[in-house]
Image (spheres, rainbow, N blue to C red):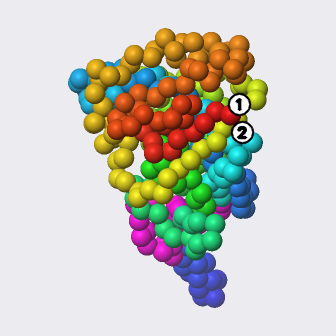
């Protein structure tokens, strides 16, 4: 009798154990317990910007075709410039029956923004960092990590400096490094263009020719001695600022400086900094009521202007 009771207790114990381990608990397979990186997110100016035509049909109907020579600006080539700073932290994530209920469509991701003197606050759904992080987590099927991203903003929004696009590219590169995703430069650029047409440039930065809608990148060599001074007026953050500026463009006044762009590219390839000065141009300047002073040019759709020293 005692032997039968022990066998019965053993069966009950075994059933309880099986029931316990069948609960949906997923443990991370991460090779690390926690990791954090921080890095700057720079800005850009457009050394040349030609607006060529408008896409008439298809997915990108209404988009303007352009060719533009973009130059990354950094504290090293632009006096007084302060980049944004991004910190990404990844921790193993335990998901199971006792886990908190998801409070957002991407419960393992939190993104915060702060100014150098401010308290971090959650970003809104249109933030490019949030979009880039969600895109990486979805495309690369990342679920075993809790990701926290904090950006300290120094680059003004809606300024023509590409701060939001730079932030998105920085997050794509940062997550690729931190999570060891082994994404190629081309793959990162393909993902980047889903955020904005400026974002692919920032995957490699430097100086580059951007074509089509801005997403096709041809890297150009660095030029020794380039130095810039930028001026950004006090501005109110405008929703869809660049899109609204494109709508104002008169194509009859644009695309007339493509030969200067070709000469500019040649000057860059031959490291002719002196020739570059006379070849700068931007078709968004056709929207200005009054011409800018000599040697001063818009960056992107403005309002930031720059001088090449």
For the record, the magenta segment spans: 89-111
Indicate left or right for 258 with 7 as reference. left
**Whole-percent x and y of residue 275?**
65, 17
**Whole-percent x and y of residue 225?**
76, 29
Would you name the residue on which mark 2 appears?
Answer: 77
Indicate left or right for 191 with 180 as reference. left
* Residue 268 in the image: above or below residue 206: above
Indicate left or right for 306 with 128 as reference. right
Viewer-nearest residue: 88 or 294: 294
Viewer-nearest residue: 19 or 118: 118
Secondary structure at numbered mark 1: loop
Q: Is residue 213 visible?
A: no
Q: Residues within 10 Å of mark 1 (few under 14, many from 20)?
A: some
Q: Residue at x 34, y 38 (%)?
A: 289
Main SS category, magenta section: loop
Q: Residue furthest left?
A: 57
Q: Indicate yes or no whether the magenta region holds residue 104.
A: yes
Q: Residues within 10 Å of mark 2 (few under 14, many from 20)?
A: some
Q: Is residue 9 visible?
A: yes
Secondary structure at numbered mark 2: loop
* Residue 227 in the image: above or below residue 35: above
Q: Residue at x 54, y 12 (%)?
A: 262
**Whole-percent x and y of residue 163?**
53, 48
Quadrant (top left/top right/bottom left/bottom right) for the C terminus: top right
Which quarter of the picture shows residue 147? bottom right
Would you name the residue on which mark 1 appears?
Answer: 226
For marks 2 and 1, the one nearer the N-term is: 2
Viewer-nearest residue: 192 or 31: 192
**Whole-percent x and y of residue 35?**
72, 58
Q: Residue at x 71, y 62 (%)?
A: 34
Q: Residue at x 50, y 53 (%)?
A: 233
Quadrant (top left/top right/bottom left/bottom right) for the N terminus: bottom right
């Amino acid at each position: 009798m005692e032997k039968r009771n022990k066998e019965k207790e053993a069966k009950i114990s075994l059933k309880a154990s099986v029931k316990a381990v069948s609960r949906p608990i997923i443990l991370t397979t991460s090779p690390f317990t926690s990791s954090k990186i921080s890095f700057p997110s720079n800005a850009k100016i457009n050394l040349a910007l030609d607006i060529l035509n408008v896409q008439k049909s298809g997915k990108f109907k209404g988009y303007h075709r352009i060719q533009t020579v973009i130059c990354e600006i950094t504290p090293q080539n632009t006096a007084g410039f302060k980049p944004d700073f991004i910190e990404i932290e990844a921790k193993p994530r335990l998901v199971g029956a006792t886990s908190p209920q998801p409070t957002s469509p991407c419960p393992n991701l939190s993104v915060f923004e702060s100014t150098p003197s401010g308290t971090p606050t959650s970003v809104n759904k249109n933030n490019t960092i949030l979009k880039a992080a969600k895109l990486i987590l979805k495309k690369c099927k990342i679920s075993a990590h809790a990701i926290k991203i904090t950006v300290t903003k120094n680059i003004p929004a809606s300024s023509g400096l590409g701060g939001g696009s730079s932030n998105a590219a920085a997050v794509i590169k940062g997550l690729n490094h931190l999570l060891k995703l082994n994404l190629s430069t081309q793959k990162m650029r393909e993902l980047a263009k889903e955020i904005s047409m400026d974002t692919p440039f920032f995957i490699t930065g430097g100086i580059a020719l951007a074509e089509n809608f801005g997403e096709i990148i041809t890297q150009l060599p660095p030029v020794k001695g380039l130095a810039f001074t930028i001026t950004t007026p006090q501005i109110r953050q405008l929703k869809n600022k660049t899109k609204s500026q494109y709508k104002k463009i008169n194509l009859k006044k644009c695309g007339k400086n493509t030969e200067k762009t070709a000469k500019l590219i040649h000057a860059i390839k031959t490291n002719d900094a002196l020739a570059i000065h006379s070849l700068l141009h931007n078709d968004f300047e056709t929207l200005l009521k009054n011409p800018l002073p000599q040697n001063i040019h818009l960056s992107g759709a403005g309002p930031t202007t720059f001088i090449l020293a």
